[in-house]
Image (spheres, helix red, strand yellow):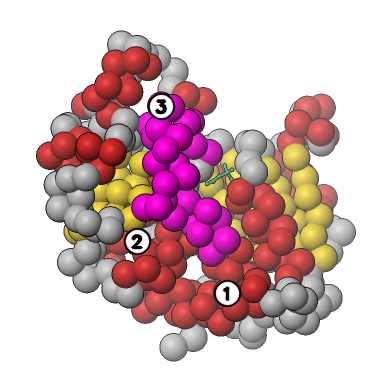
Amino acid sequence: MSFKRKDLLGIEDLSPEEIYFILDTAKSFRQILDRSIKKVPTLRGKTVANLFFEPSTRTRISFELAAKRLNADVVSFSSSTSSVVKGESLLDTVKNIMAMRVDCFILRHPTPGAPHILAKNLPISVINAGDGSHEHPTQALLDLYTIREKRGKFKDLQVVIIGDIAHSRVARSDIWALSKLGAKVRICGPPTLIPPQIEKMGVKVFYSVKEAIRGVDVVMMLRIQKERQNKCFFPSLREYREFFSLNEERLGLAKSGAMLMHPGPVNRGIELPVSLVDGKRSVILNQVTNGIAVRMAVLYLLLGRKR
Ligand code: CP
């Protein structure tokens, strides 16, 4: 198969074949990261612009490293230190940067759909690095990569996602991705943080962590997205922790050897205790490493081949 897309905007409109194609491509890039010289000439002469209108550690550095590992030039833009603070619009910003002859925009923006607007209006590739609470496609792809690395398959794998589902773009992209590949997805959180009608995405909803986690192969924890909450969704953090955090006893209800995942940033002591973040079930740092390989694959498929 070939990958003919100009942009990567979400998982929702990808086919299972396209997802596997990205994962297979990422596998060939993953080994480069363990070499002493972690660089290939694949994107020499291309320029990638990282546009971040929201804070980020993992996604921003990972995309920058992915582009550099492929020998592309990278420019990084942060809205707080740009002319956006003087009133320049998103479209004017990107048109001006495009006039400097960049080949690709990687956009993180608080508004759902912002990358879609760029993709529609610009002739160059756009990659969604997280748009509001809508999608975070490369996070889902790196989660899939990590699950496949450890489990080898998705069919009938039981995965539970626990936490603030309503405000999580990671949850939405992971639900699309896992369901398309045949995994069974459960979600769990306080009723106020479960979006109405989410069952239509094919997930099973739980309000008790103990019930949700019983017999699963993968436990994915999410942080509370305070920056997207404009009101109180639960009485107190203490209460949230009591009912929805993970602990050894609750994790013990999953299958033996179940993987513990988290997209980061982790709020240690809230959704996860320190012992589990750094424990033997945790693959959190594997996710981060695999993220570079997945982003190298995405950049290569969008920029390195003739469409
Ligand atoms: N997982 C993730 O998107 O982390 P950052 O916000 O640090 O990029």
Task: List the residue tagged with mark 3.
Answer: 270
Q: Nearer the viewer, mark 2 or mark 3?
A: 3
Ligand 1 shown in quarter:
top right
Query: In this view of the protein, can residue 112 be seen by the observer?
Result: no
Query: Any magenta on residue 275?
Result: yes
- Alpha carbon distance from label 2 to label 3: 27 Å
Label 2: element kind: helix
In the picture as drawn, the residue positioned furthest to the bottom comes out as 1
Label 1: element kind: helix
Sort mark 2 into few (<14), some (14-19) or many (20+) by Cα contacts within 10 Å.
Answer: many
User: Percent x, y for residue 243?
Assistant: 24, 24
Q: Specify whether tag 2 is near ligand 1 (CB below 8 Å).
A: no
Boundaries of the magenta span: 265-290
Decide which of tag 1 and tag 3 comes sooner along the chain: 1
In the image, residue 129 sits, relative to residue 163, either above or below, namely below
Residue at 53% x, 75% y is 26
Task: List the residue tagged with mark 2.
Answer: 177
Q: Specify whether tag 1 is near ligand 1 (CB below 8 Å).
A: no
Give the quadrant of residue 306. bottom right
Decide which of tag 2 and tag 1 comes sooner along the chain: 1
Label 3: element kind: loop
Q: Quadrant of the N terminus?
A: bottom left
In the image, residue 9 sits, relative to residue 196, either above or below, namely below
Q: For the residue marked with disc 3, what is the amino acid?
A: Ile
Q: Judge by depth and name the residue closer to the eye, 246 or 124.
A: 246
Mark seen at residue 141: none
User: Percent x, y for residue 221?
Assistant: 36, 41
- Alpha carbon distance from label 1 to label 3: 32 Å
Mark 2 vs 1: CB contact within 8 A: no
Query: Any magenta on residue 140?
Result: no
Task: List the residue tagged with mark 1.
Answer: 30
Q: For the residue marked with disc 1, what is the amino acid?
A: Arg
